[in-house]
Amino acid sequence: MEEFMEEAHPGSRAWCAIVGLPPPSGRSVASILLRLVLAVLSLILAGVKAIATDASEATETQVTSGRGGRILTNIGVWSPDSRWLVYDTRSDAAGDDFNGTRIEAVNVETREVRLVYESRHEARCGVVTFHPKRWQVVFIHGPENPTPDWTYGPFHRQGVCVDWDQPGVAVSLDARDLSEPMTPGALRGGSHVHVFNGDGTLVSFTYEDHVLALARGAGGADLNQRNIGVSVVGRPVTVKKDHVRNHDGKAFTVLVSRTENAPRPGSDEIQKAFEEGWVGTNGYVRSDGRRQLALAFQGLVINSRGETNSEVYIAELPADLTVPGAGPLGGTAVSRPSPPHGVEQRRLTRTADRRFAGIQGPRHWLRASPDGSAIAFLMKDDDGVVQLWTVSPLGGPQRQITRNEHPIASTFTWSPDGRSLAHTMDRSICLTDVAHGTTRRLTAPTSEREAPRPEACVFSPDGTKVAYLRNLTDTDGLRSNQIFVVSAR
């Protein structure tokens, strides 16, 4: 035992000197116990030193400068070669005021800034993401020449695409048709947070409906609900032009979630579908061994006690999203668009009996591992601390990943190899090892005023870097969001 202790933990004699004890000797029970205690202290000290080294040796680089707000989307902000970051510009640090007119990109190696798109005619644009393979971006575009009855809002926006080598040329992604009979493949409202799937053939988004926002149900109830939709790229849709806000699109667009205006308490019916994410780069493996294309999302339920909380849901998608299901794909004047034939919606978590029910923490989108085997989300533990959890797309119990003292404080993304999750915690950029649940800092803690912002913490496609935002004060005393990159190695 003595030889083992001194060989494995040579610092034990140093610990004795620090605490004022004689060095251990002999093989008595007391001596062996003392050696065990000193070994544990040495391991703790080694772990503390490792965390400090991670923070002090990380390569953190500010890649933007100058005045102006900058907002990174929570995923898909890197170019396919991991050299450029795309972002939008807004006046406030949190990006709550959707008033930007420019989509820009910065080269993380040269700091070159490139204008990708600038809106015109009082339109606003933002929430931009890259195609995973092509040099193309997709983002929200607000209405041009807004009028009192058609201003920017959840059901008055659309997705547009811009090719890298044709900056300034925007092509509508989703078509809009506001008059009956509604065109299949077109929607009647606004789309938001557009994200390509792994091969770039589909785009997911959240959606709200203009037609139902104007209609009213029994007792004046609002019939509009937030839902999840998918655009099938390469299937253009042409609509009639009998409404000034109708327009064609380059993709066949449908809703894939099912919501109810008045969900039954205790049921799996949901009032709202939101914060979605693709399950895997190529779906997930079903129990029968087949690959299944799917989207995970948060569903707003009412539990048996009448309380509202979010749970994890999944929408399994058929190979062909253009075939009508139980109702018309375009909807009617009094009903929302129906999902295509073959879409299956399932609930994956049931947390009503937990001390802190439902998904908890900062606003975040569900993100699945690259192989599709685990869907990550945030939820409080029994002590009220926001932790990372996962659940299988096949169902079953949720798994708690982190057990940290500090809460997870941001959105998160998976590393391309599926081993780690990048997020903020305790004013630091951190990586959590998913298999072991251990978290290490990539950056040292900063002041609250300059801490990483919660909107984005995004792995690069090559897995070597993480991008995020800090709100800083310049030499003139003005504050602005700046983009930072840190090495993930």
Image (cartoon, rainbow, N blue to C red):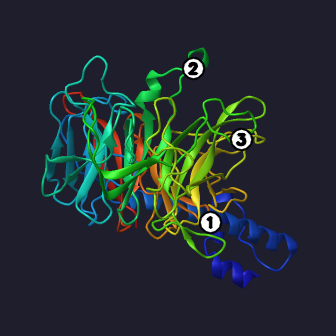
Q: Secondary structure at mark 1?
A: loop
Q: Position of residue 195 (x, y in %)?
A: 38, 52
**Alpha-carbon distance for marks 3 and 1?**
21 Å
**Is residue 25 shown above or below 73?**
below
Amino acid type at circle 2 is Ala
**Alpha-carbon distance for marks 3 and 2?**
38 Å
Instruction: Please report whichever mark, 3 or 2, sits nearer to the chain's N-terminal start.
Output: 2
Work out which residue is located at the far front of the displayed protein and give it: 181
**Is residue 208 shown above or below 389?**
above
Amino acid type at circle 3 is Asp
Whether residue 19 sits left or right of residue 276 in the image: it is: right
Whether residue 26 sits left or right of residue 99 in the image: it is: right
> Which residue is drawn at the image coordinates 45% and 66% (left, top)?
281
Q: Quadrant of the C terminus?
A: bottom left
In front of the other: 461 or 231: 231
> Which residue is drawn at the image coordinates 73% and 35% (left, top)?
303
Say the numbered circle drawn on residue 221: 2
> Which residue is drawn at the image coordinates 19% and 25% (left, top)?
145
Whether residue 309 sits left or right of residue 208 in the image: it is: right
Q: Secondary structure at mark 3?
A: loop
Q: Quadrant of the N terminus?
A: bottom right
Question: Which residue is disc 1 drawn over?
Answer: 436
Work out which residue is located at the far right of the displayed protein and give it: 29
**Alpha-carbon distance for marks 1 and 2?**
48 Å
Amino acid type at circle 1 is His
Question: Which residue is disc 3 drawn over?
Answer: 383
> Which residue is drawn at the image coordinates 71% and 84% (left, top)?
3
